[in-house]
Image (cartoon, rainbow, N blue to C red):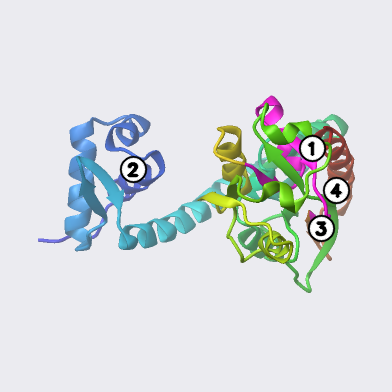
Amino acid sequence: MRRQPSLRQIEAFKAVIEHGTISRAAAALYVSQPAMSKMIASLEWDADLELFDRVNGRLAPTERGMRLYDEIDRIFAGVQQVANAIDVIRREDQGRIAIGVMPALSGIFIEQVTTAFLKRHPQVFCFVESRSSTRLMEWLVTRKLDVALVEEGIDNPYVMSEPLMEHPLVCIMPPGHALTAKTLVKPADLDGLPYVSFRPGATVIGQLLEEQRARPNVVLVASMALTLCSFVAAGHGVSLVHPAMVKMFGERLAARPFEPAIPRGFQICRRRDNRNARLVADFVEVAHEMGCRILTDGTKV
C-alpha cells in the first residue's frame, strides 16, 4: 500500500541529488548505504514516480526527479528562512542585515565585502543567501532580504538599483597559453581556438564574434560563469568573462584585455522603503569599494 512520502525519504532524495551518489548521500545523513538505497526505493514506490534511472549501478535523476527536486529545494529554502527569522529575532538588539548574492559573486567577492562591512559594524549579524538573480529580486521585494547583488538588466518598481563593477569583458586562458603573449586580444585571435561558451549565438558575445566573422571552436557550454572559468583553468579552451571572475581563480587563470569592448557588470539592489537603511547604505558603499579593488587586480596583465 502506497503512503505519503516521509520527511526522511525527502531528505534522502535531496541528498542523493546534491551529493551525486548513494554512498556520499548516506555519509552526509549518517546512515548506511543500504538504508539510503531502501529510502530512495520506497520513495519512488510511495510517490509512484520513477525518480532515477539506474545506469551502470549509478543513479541518474530523471526529468520528473529533477522537477520534484526543484520543488523540494524551494520548500527547504522556505524552512531555512524560518530558521533565519528565529536568528534575526534573537539578535534584534544587535542589528542585522540580510544579504543576497548571485552565484557568480558568492565566493571571494562577497566574503571580502562582508568582512570589510563587519569591521565597520562588528556587532551586526549578517545573513548571506546565494540564489539566482530572479529569486533574490523576489526575496528583496518581499522583505526577506535587505540588499541583493544580482546580474544586470533585472528591474522592479519597488527596488532601487545601481551599477556594480561595470567593466569590459576580458579574455581568459590557462597560464602559458599562446594568447598570453599578446597584450590585447581581438576576435580574429579566437578564430578556430578551443572555446568555452555560455550559449553560442544567443549572447552579446556570440553576436559580436559572428559580426567579426570569428568562429572559435566551441568545445564546452556552461550556464554559470564559475563553471565556465573552471573549464578554462583546466585547459579546455579560452573564453570571455567579467574580470571579477579572474580574481576568484588567482594564478589558475591568465587574462588579457579584449577589443572591441563588451561592457558588462552587475547591480546592487535595495528596497526603496528599506527599514534597515543605514546599514544597507554602508554595505553598498563597501561593495563599491571592494568592487574597485577587484577590478584593479583582475584586469592586470
Q: Which residue is mark 2?
A: 16
Examine the rendering and report whether any part of residue 89 can be seen. Answer: no
Q: Is residue 94 above or below residue 7?
A: above
Give the residue at mark 3. Answer: 275
Q: Which mark is residue 113?
A: 1
Q: Secondary structure at mark 4?
A: helix
- Per the rendered image, the range of residues in magenta is 238-264
* SS class, disc 3: loop
Of marks 3 and 1, the one in the foreground: 1
Which three-letter amino acid code belongs to the residue tagged 3? Arg
Tell me which numbered mark, 2 or 4, is placed earlier along the sequence.
Answer: 2
Residue 252 placement (x, y as % from top left): 65, 28
Q: Quadrant of the C terminus?
A: top right
Type of residue at label 2? Answer: Val
Number of other residues with Cα within 10 Å of mark 4, as a class: few under 14, some 14 to 19, many 20 or more: many
Q: For residue 282, which quarter of the picture? A: top right
Q: CA–CA distance between discs 2 and 4?
A: 38 Å
Q: Is residue 153 above or below residue 231?
A: below
